[in-house]
Image: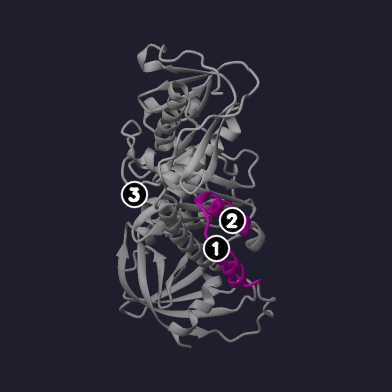
């Protein structure tokens, strides 16, 4: 068999469901055969093995088809060892799942990824089981999702369209979209699918868990078995300084499954710029394979381009809107909103709402409404507002507005954001406001009735 022509067809043998055997020969002809924890697909002509201490340039690996029990021998030539970087992190995450699943979490630790060129592939003769019917192709679903994204629209509709497509076309029940905080080292959730609580606004540091590692390394990370090494709660706490642990009660809970059997995190990239991460998971083991990974990586590229077009369309030519007033609303109790300037965190009464750039945006809108009766705003003026302190002109303002709009819809009865056109939106206030800036003694605002 030609290695280049057929290694792609054997990717399902490289999932780690069945251990592979590796054979080498010493100078004196003494053979050595052992099991290897994983044979990792790199590309159509290369595989990677976990570091084996063999000090041999050539080896033969035998892999097994988990569906038919057919055996294949791969003739390999050693090229190099990698101890960091995207490939190493993909193998490390996958190995953590295999180790946890087999009860070897304290034994299997990746020290390096040995890269081999595949020189030949030989099918071992034998009576094997018939191959089961082919699984449903991912291409029609990918085509349908890509067409929906290409149809355009604002970021809000793009995010919703993507999540609907994942469920309808790929049968994915749990998913999240997270955006990169361009001036920091965190990701924040802007949309989710399937969870009892959306988790919009929840954050995770770069490098934490499968999502954070995919973002940091700019590569897809897939795990087929649950592992504590990549659990959300542990990943979050392991990446927080000691003095920040006490403030976790003010954080928005992450919406992920308690013990996912399968996880796949795909970075959303434009060139080498990280926009965010698309993450899917399942309670089932082995739910996502190489075909799913290929499809979602392609879909993430399509999403990145659609996001760029949507952002350009939203900002282009949006004029400064005139002030407008709201229709009368029934009198209701005052809504007390407190701000802490250290991180622009906002609280409604005693309940945490939002922080960071999104918090600064909402604080500006509420103050403009309170002082001037404004309700109509534009994205352009927010970009130019010095009190918001947007970190970079390329920072995704629209994604932050989506986060803020969805967070208000979930947590705030009386304040809402409504889109009114390209690059324009309305602040709707249905209750009297009391705005308290806690950095100035909490006396920066008085109750003000909604604008008439």
Label 2 Cα crowd, 10 Å radius (few <14 / some 14-19 / many 20+): some
Contact between marks 2 and 1 (CB within 8 A): the answer is yes
Residue 434 image label? none
> Given this view, does label 3 or label 1 mark the residue nearer the observer?
1
Residue at mark 1: 151
Is any part of residue 31 visible from this angle? no
Residue at mark 3: 394
Residue at mark 2: 161
Magenta segment includes 219: no
Contact between marks 2 and 3 (CB within 8 A): the answer is no
Q: Which residues are magenta?
A: 136-165
Q: Marks 2/3: CA distance?
A: 24 Å
Give the main secondary structure, helix, strand or loop, of the magenta stretch: helix
Element type at marker 1? loop
Q: Earlier in the sequence, mark 2 or mark 1?
A: 1
Element type at marker 3? loop
Residue 265 in the image: x percent, y percent? Answer: 49, 54
Point 63% across, 24% down: residue: 329
**Foreground pick, 60 / 211:** 211
| Picture quarter with the C terminus | top right
């Amino acid at each position: 068999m030609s290695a280049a022509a057929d290694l792609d067809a054997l990717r399902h043998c490289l999932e780690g469901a069945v251990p592979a055997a590796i054979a080498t020969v010493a100078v004196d002809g003494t053979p050595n055969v052992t099991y290897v924890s994983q044979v990792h697909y790199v590309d159509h002509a290369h595989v990677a093995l976990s570091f084996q201490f063999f000090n041999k340039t050539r080896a033969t690996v035998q892999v097994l088809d988990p569906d038919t029990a057919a055996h294949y021998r791969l003739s390999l030539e050693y090229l190099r060892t990698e101890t960091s970087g995207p490939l190493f992190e993909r193998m490390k995450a996958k190995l953590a799942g295999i180790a946890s699943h087999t009860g070897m979490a304290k034994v299997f630790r990746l020290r390096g990824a040995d890269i081999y060129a595949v020189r030949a592939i030989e099918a071992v003769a034998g009576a094997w089981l018939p191959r089961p019917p082919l699984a449903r192709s991912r291409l029609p679903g990918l085509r349908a999702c890509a067409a929906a994204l290409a149809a355009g629209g604002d970021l809000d509709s793009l995010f919703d369209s993507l999540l609907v497509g994942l469920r309808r076309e790929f049968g994915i029940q749990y998913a999240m979209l997270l955006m990169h905080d361009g001036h920091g080292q965190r990701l924040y959730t802007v949309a989710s699918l399937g969870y009892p609580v959306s988790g919009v606004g929840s954050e995770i540091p770069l490098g934490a868990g499968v999502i954070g590692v995919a973002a940091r390394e700019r590569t897809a990370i897939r795990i087929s078995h649950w592992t504590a090494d990549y659990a959300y709660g542990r990943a979050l706490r392991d990446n927080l300084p000691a003095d920040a642990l006490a403030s976790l009660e003010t954080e928005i809970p992450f919406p992920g499954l308690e013990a996912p059997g399968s996880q796949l995190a795909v970075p959303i990239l434009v060139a080498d710029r990280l926009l965010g991460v698309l993450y899917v998971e399942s309670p089932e083991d082995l739910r996502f394979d190489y075909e799913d990974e290929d499809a979602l990586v392609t879909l993430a590229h399509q999403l990145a381009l659609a996001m760029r077009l949507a952002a350009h369309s939203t900002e282009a030519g949006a004029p400064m809107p005139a002030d407008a007033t709201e229709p009368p609303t029934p009198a209701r109790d005052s809504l007390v909103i407190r701000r802490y300037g250290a991180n622009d965190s906002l609280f409604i009464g005693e309940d945490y709402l939002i922080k960071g750039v999104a918090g600064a945006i909402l604080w500006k809108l509420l103050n403009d409404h309170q002082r001037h009766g404004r309700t109509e705003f534009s994205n352009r003026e927010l970009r130019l507002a010095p009190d918001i302190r947007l970190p970079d002109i390329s920072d995704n303002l629209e994604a932050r507005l989506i986060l803020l709009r969805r967070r208000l819809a979930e947590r705030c009865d009386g304040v809402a954001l409504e889109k009114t056109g390209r690059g324009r939106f309305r602040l709707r206030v249905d209750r009297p406001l009391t705005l308290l800036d806690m950095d100035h003694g909490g006396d920066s605002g008085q109750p003000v009735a909604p604008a008439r």
